[in-house]
Image (cartoon, coloured by chain):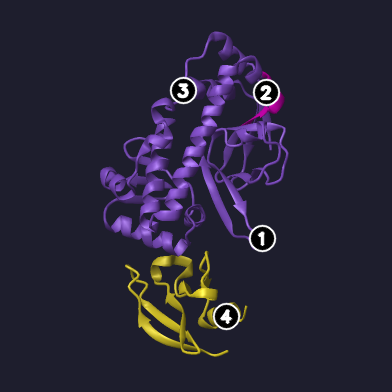
Chain colours: A yellow, B purple
């Protein structure tokens, strides 16, 4: 399963603006936001700002890098 | 876990009950003669575990504790916060198996009261039994308020509501004044309390500071704009029954 990433700016109300739309087979499945330096130890990591259907999660995770985020999203889509 | 018999512990219980009713000398003496034992606990230590069948109830004397539940993959939900004068596992007197855990959040001093002694006390003094029942009913009211928050309030409103509640609870037992109170918990604790993530909590706290609603220094919360915070949270303190609780 291949995911396509598209840069976007998300209005989180703060400084977490650098973001990516994540598409699978043309469908938007997730929005990842890179955490700004206001998040201390998680600065630079990627937060699942939104996930759709199988990618939705009650405790949205934070990923160390984009590879980790894509593996997690792909696993959710395959469930 | 050093322990000691401690007469101050039963005095704390007398003061708590006197805050919601007048006790007779006989009732006061009966409470004061409870065989209470106190323990000094570390931060993040279990007091009672999910599934335990405790033989005593716990009275918090110092520090913070919380009720919590952990799911199979480690996700944690904090169910309530407890401070000095609270009896967070009073239910174990009549419901033998714990359906959640109770643990410290900070270093804490707690007193254990044997079920047998507490049961005898409530049989000999039904009015004390009614006061303890009343305490569990107020506890249930707090659960309802949390359910409304978690189900229907925004992250910002939820944090505002919790801060109002914690301040008033701490103020009622003399642990807060002038809109300043201890908040010895982490952003992860707050997230696990409100069903959010620490990312959300961090954003909310930043916005609250930006709007001059609060300041947070170390483990001290200062509410800079109480009326505005009440308005945002639509906070109605009726459920805390504070006019009868001030200890």
Residue B51 in the image: state x and y as whole percent. 71, 45
Q: Which residue is mark 3?
A: B20
| Helix, strand or loop under label 2 | helix
* Front tag of 4 and 3: 4
Q: Which residue is mark 1?
A: B72
Q: Label 4, on which residue?
A: A77
Residue at horizontal 54 percent and vertical 90 percent from the top:
A2
Point out the stretch of residues depicted in magenta. B111-120
Of callouts 2 and 3, the N-terminal one:
3
Distance between mark 4 and mark 2 Cα atoms: 54 Å
Are there few (<14), some (14-19), or many (20+) residues within 10 Å of tag 1?
Answer: few
Disc 2 crowd rating (10 Å Cα; few below 14, some 14-19, many 20+) is some
- Does the residue at mark 1 contact the one at mark 4 (Cβ under 8 Å)? no
> Residue tagged by mark 2?
B119
Decide if residue B176 is in sight here: no
**Residue at mark 2 to residue at mark 3: CA–CA distance:** 20 Å
């Amino acid at each position: 399963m291949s995911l396509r990433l598209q840069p976007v700016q998300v209005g989180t109300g703060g400084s977490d603006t650098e973001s990516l739309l994540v598409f699978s087979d043309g469908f938007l499945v997730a929005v990842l936001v890179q955490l700004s330096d206001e998040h201390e130890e998680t600065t630079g990591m990627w937060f699942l700002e939104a996930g759709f259907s199988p990618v939705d999660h009650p405790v949205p995770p934070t990923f160390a890098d984009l590879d980790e985020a894509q593996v997690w999203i792909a696993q959710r889509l395959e469930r | 876990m050093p322990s000691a018999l401690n007469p101050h512990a039963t005095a704390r219980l007398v003061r708590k009950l006197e805050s919601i009713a007048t006790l007779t000398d006989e009732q006061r003496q009966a409470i004061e003669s409870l065989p209470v034992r106190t323990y000094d606990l570390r931060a993040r230590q279990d007091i009672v575990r999910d599934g335990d069948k405790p033989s005593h109830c716990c009275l918090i004397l110092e520090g913070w504790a919380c009720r919590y539940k952990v799911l199979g993959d480690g996700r944690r939900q904090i169910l309530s916060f407890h401070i000095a004068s609270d009896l967070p596992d009073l239910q174990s007197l009549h419901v033998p198996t714990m359906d959640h855990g109770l643990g410290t959040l900070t270093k804490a001093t707690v007193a254990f009261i044997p079920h047998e002694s507490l049961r005898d006390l409530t049989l000999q003094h039904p009015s004390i039994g009614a006061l303890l029942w009343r305490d569990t009913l107020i506890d249930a009211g707090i659960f309802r308020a949390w359910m409304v928050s978690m189900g229907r309030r925004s992250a910002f409103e939820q944090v505002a509501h919790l801060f109002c509640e914690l301040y008033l609870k701490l103020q009622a037992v003399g642990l807060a004044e002038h809109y300043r109170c201890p908040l010895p918990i982490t952003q992860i604790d707050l997230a696990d309390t409100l069903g959010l993530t620490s990312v959300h909590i961090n954003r909310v706290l930043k916005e609250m500071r930006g709007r001059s609603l609060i300041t947070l220094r170390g483990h001290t919360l200062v509410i800079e704009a109480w009326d505005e915070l009440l308005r945002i949270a639509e906070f109605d303190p009726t459920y805390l029954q504070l006019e009868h609780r001030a200890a």
